[in-house]
Image (cartoon, rainbow, N blue to C red):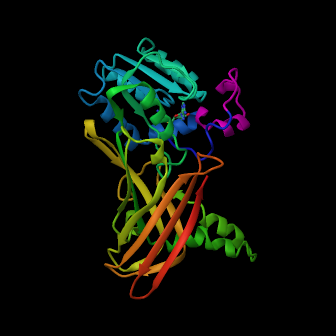
């Protein structure tokens, strides 16, 4: 899951079908257009991992399955292929109309019940053995769909039921990124001879979702937080001063912190990662630029904390706060930067 616009502010009215939705409707309901689903389905790291996890022996066979946010219905259809007894698939966006046609076209209409609406507002007719969902956003928590998964789990999952995926780990490292920082941030200081650096100040406060190359990474990866999805509560939506230590693996300049995550289906023994060291996924990485670069020598350490919480006005957005301290041979410094992901 991932989209930069808010998928849920105003749901389209009942009569509105994908065929007559305008750009204004899509702005509030970005998951209705097929292009976002195309991007997710073509992310083979993501989709193949879900397929392997759902199809692993003993996960879905003869089970009642709930698919939270089914989109095109892909995960529900994997579950049927894996031998599920029945699948309930909930989706609030208009893409559910296509999911219904897709399920029918693939001869699974008797096995999959599609339920249109928000997870928080619909009813599922029975308790389920397995909950599957692809809820992860940029920076893992952007869009905060995890709260809907927690809600569904607590309401419909039988005691001892499975949650797929059941473990997510958020990481941070630090990178050299002089060229891109110059192009995205410093560039605003001189635009056709004009000083537009006030926009640069806004740009630096927004995490940049983009691909980082493995060779740019200067430090180790440090864990910020491990999420146990089978037991997480809404309190886990907030990360408060999570401490990290990054050790330089070589001498280089540091221009940004980078976050990424991995996703585990422990019962199925499937894991995938959105690390810069791994194959491309549509989540890419989230880059947090520092106002001032740091020069690190091999073995020197940055000590920091990161906080991240849903924005008070729009809980789908994220407020992120990074504090760091660095005592190196060339430089001793500390800083705090606030970021807003919208
Ligand atoms: N399962 C699909 C789609 C994943 S994207 C796949 O793997 O390809 C997440 C989907 O969840 C989106 O289609 C979005 O519209 C839906 N969604 C997000 N929050 C929801 C909620 N509260 N209730 C119902 N659907 C939701």
Q: Residue at x 58, y 35 (%)?
A: 31
| Residue 282 visible in the current orientation | no
Q: Residue at x 36, y 69 (%)?
A: 245
Q: Is residue 185 left or right of residue 227?
A: right
Name the foreground residue: 46 vs 256: 256
Q: Is residue 213 left or right of residue 93?
A: left
Q: Is residue 309 above or below residue 30?
A: below
- State which region is magenta: 11-33
Q: Residue 105's spot in the image, x, y percent?
A: 47, 16
Q: Residue at x 55, y 24 (%)?
A: 96
Q: Residue at x 33, y 27 (%)?
A: 159
| Number of numbered tags placed on the structure image | 0
Q: Quadrant of residue 203?
A: bottom right
Q: Is residue 200 left or right of residue 285?
A: right
Q: Is residue 24 magenta?
A: yes
| Residue 270 visible in the current orientation | yes
Q: Residue 72's spot in the image, x, y percent?
A: 50, 28
Name the foreground residue: 322 vs 294: 322
Residue at the bottom extreme of this rendering? 330
Residue at the right extreme of this rendering? 194
Residue at the top extreme of this rendering? 110
Q: Residue 239's spot in the image, x, y percent?
A: 47, 54
Name the foreground residue: 273 vs 135: 135
Q: Is residue 187 magenta?
A: no
Q: Residue 171's spot in the image, x, y percent?
A: 39, 58
Q: Quadrant of residue 246?
A: bottom left
């Amino acid at each position: 899951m991932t989209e930069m616009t808010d998928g849920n502010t105003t749901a389209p009215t009942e009569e509105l079908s994908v065929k007559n939705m305008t750009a204004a409707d899509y702005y509030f309901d970005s998951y209705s257009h097929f292009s976002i689903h195309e991007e997710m389905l073509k992310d083979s790291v993501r989709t193949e991992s879900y397929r392997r996890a759902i199809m692993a022996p003993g996960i879905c066979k003869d089970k009642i399955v709930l698919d939270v946010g089914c989109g095109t219905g892909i995960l529900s259809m994997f579950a049927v292929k894996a031998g599920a007894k029945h699948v309930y698939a909930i989706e609030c966006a208009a893409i559910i109309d296509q999911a219904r046609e897709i399920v029918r076209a693939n001869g699974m209409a008797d096995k999959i019940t599609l339920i249109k609406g928000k997870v928080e507002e619909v009813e599922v007719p029975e308790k389920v053995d397995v909950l599957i969902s692809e809820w992860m956003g940029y920076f893992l928590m952007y869009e905060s769909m995890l709260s809907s998964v927690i809600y569904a789990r607590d309401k419909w999952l039988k005691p001892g039921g499975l949650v797929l995926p059941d473990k997510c780990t958020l990481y941070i490292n630090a990178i050299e990124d002089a060229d891109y920082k110059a192009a995205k941030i410093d560039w605003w200081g001189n635009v056709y001879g004009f000083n537009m650096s006030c926009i640069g100040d806004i740009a630096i406060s927004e995490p940049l979702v983009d691909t980082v190359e493995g060779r740019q990474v200067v430090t180790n990866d440090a864990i910020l937080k491990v999420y146990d999805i089978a037991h997480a509560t809404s309190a886990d939506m907030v990360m408060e001063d999570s401490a990290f230590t990054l050790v330089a693996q070589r001498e280089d300049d540091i221009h940004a912190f980078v976050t990424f995550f991995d996703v585990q289906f422990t019962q199925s023994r499937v894991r995938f990662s959105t690390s810069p060291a791994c194959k491309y996924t549509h989540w890419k990485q989230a880059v947090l630029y520092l106002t001032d670069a740091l020069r690190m020598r091999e073995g020197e350490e940055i000590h920091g904390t990161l906080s991240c919480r849903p924005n008070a006005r729009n809980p789908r957005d994220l407020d992120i706060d990074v504090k760091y301290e660095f005592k190196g041979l060339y430089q001793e410094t500390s800083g705090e930067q606030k970021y807003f992901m919208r």
